[in-house]
Image (cartoon, grey):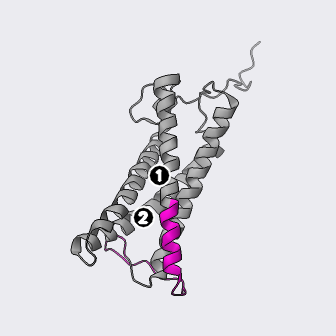
Amino acid sequence: MGFSFMQNTSAPTLRRRYDGLTILLHWATALIVIFMFASAHIWEVLDRGTPLRKGLQSVHISVGILLAVIIIGRLLWRLFTVSTGRSKQEPIAMPTAMKAASHLTHLVLYLLLISQIVLGFLFRWAQAEPFYFFGLFPIPDVFDFDSVMPRTFGMLHNNVAWALIIVAGVHALAALFHHYVLRDGTLRRMLPGSHGRS
């Protein structure tokens, strides 16, 4: 006699690629980081006080605020997918050292992103000048910094930007190595429109 109330012990289906929101937030972050780095260096060659330079700086600040929202969203979504098991992927065979390096790189990237966002806000607040999100509303000033702090925050903001670009570049090269040399499907997991279970 069968027992219809027996529990289903089959393992949950594992993903072959990340979910759509994770992919969207990942590539949005990548594009914004590239834009932020490029725009900061472009306005350095423009004359001070010109509308183009001021406009580019304004967009840079607004996109930086957008990046802060995206990173918060990524962290919250990551916590949700991990806690619900939605992020479980089919395992890819790779040496332990390579897997550890991958996890470390992701951790460093998140730390650099968060540090860069915080430093960006601190830098603008230290300048004691109002700044806006795409001209829609001002960001309130919550600190009263010493006059020496803008230079300090600006230097740290620039140094972290370079560190972020370097680590992100290493991350991108590693993804290409997995895709074209190891051919293990690592990069395809983060590409939109990839075939396979999602």
Residue at 58% across / 39% down in the picture? 86
Task: Look at discs 1 and 2 and give the one toward the viewer.
Answer: 1
Q: Is residue 135 left or right of residue 118?
A: left
Residue at the image point whose x is 63% and y is 24% from the top = 93
Q: How far across and how far down the image is residue 106, in percent? A: 58, 46
Q: Which mark is residue 84?
A: none
Extreme residue toward the top, this view? 1
What residue appears at the point 69 percent right and 31 percent down from the top-left corner? 96
Identify the residue at the far left of this view: 51
Asked whether disc 1 touches disc 2, contact meaning CB atoms under 8 Å apart, the reply is no
- Disc sitting over residue 64 in the figure: 2
Observer-nearest residue: 58 or 70? 58
Answer whether residue 155 is magenta in the image: yes
Q: Amino acid at mark 1?
A: Ile
At 50% from the left and 26% from the top, the residue drawn is: 185
Note whether 34 is above or below 96 in the view shown.
below
Q: Position of residue 58 (x, y in %)?
A: 33, 71
How many residues crowd around disc 1 within 10 Å: few (fewer than 14), some, or many (20 or more)?
some
User: Is residue 108 visible from the viewing direction of this image?
Assistant: yes
Tell me: residue 7, above or below residue 24: above
Q: Which residues are magenta?
A: 132-160
| Residue 189 magenta-highlighted | no
Name which of mark 1 and mark 2 comes first in the sequence: 2
Quadrant where the N terminus is found in the figure: top right
Q: Nearer the viewer, residue 93 or 72?
A: 93
How many C-alpha atoms fall within 10 Å of the one at disc 2: few (<14), some, or many (≥20)? Answer: many
- Element carrying mark 2: helix
Which residue is the site of mark 1?
165
Which of the pair 129/87 is nearer the observer? 129
